[in-house]
Image (cartoon, helix red, strand yellow):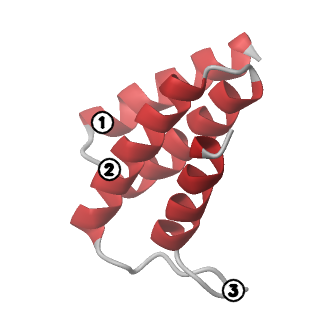
Amino acid sequence: MQGAITSWQTALTAYQSTNDRANEAIVREKLTIAYRQIGQFEQAINYWKEALTNLSKLGDFWRFPEGGTLAHRTCSNLQSIRAK
């Protein structure tokens, strides 16, 4: 899992350098999942909060074919992390 985290952090740095907030949010979601899987819940929550900050700047344009938005999914996942 550490290899995946390192790769996602490298990607996050690249997206930050180009101010690509949409992909930053996606990478932060991936980091959240990784940290949750290894039991680092505080780190996972921090990445979710940062993803939400990015999404709030983008608006609700991220829509999934099955319905809902990335912002909605992010909020739902944050609640599941807090429940643990």
Q: Nearer the viewer, residue 6 or 42?
A: 42
Point out residue 29 in the picture as x, y percentages from the top left corner: 56, 45
Residue type at mark 2 is Asp
Find out whether the residues at labels 3 and 1 contact each other: C-beta distance under 8 Å.
no
Q: Which residue shows up at 68% across the image and 31% down it?
A: 36
Name the residue at the front extreme: 83
Could you give the CA–CA distance between mark 1 and mark 2, rounded to whole angstroms?
A: 6 Å
Q: Look at the image and tell me in which quarter the C terminus lies.
A: top right
Point out residue 35 in the picture as x, y percentages from the top left corner: 64, 26
Tell me the element at label 1.
Answer: helix
Q: Mark 3 or mark 1, which has the lower sequence index?
A: 1
Residue type at mark 1 is Gln
Could you give the CA–CA distance between mark 2 and mark 3, rounded to whole angstroms?
A: 22 Å
> What residue sits right under mark 1 in the picture?
16
Q: In this rendering, would 4 be left or right of 63? A: right
Q: Look at the image and tell me in which quarter the N terminus lies.
A: top right
Find out whether the residues at labels 1 and 2 contact each other: C-beta distance under 8 Å.
yes
> What residue sits right under mark 2 in the picture?
20
> What residue sits right under mark 3 in the picture?
65
Could you give the CA–CA distance between mark 3 and mark 1, rounded to whole angstroms?
A: 27 Å
Q: In this rendering, would 40 be left or right of 23? A: right
Point out residue 24 in the picture as x, y percentages from the top left corner: 41, 45
10 Å crowding of disc 1: few (<14), some (14-19), many (20+): few
Indicate the quadrant where residue 46 lies. Answer: top left
Point out residue 31 in the picture as x, y percentages from the top left corner: 58, 33
Q: Mark 2 or mark 3, which has the lower sequence index?
A: 2
Q: In this rendering, would 54 be left or right of 67? A: left
Examine the rendered structure and indicate whether residue 7 appears above or below residue 33. above
Examine the rendered structure and indicate whether residue 39 appears above or below residue 44. above
Residue type at mark 3 is Pro
Q: In this rendering, would 13 be left or right of 39? A: left
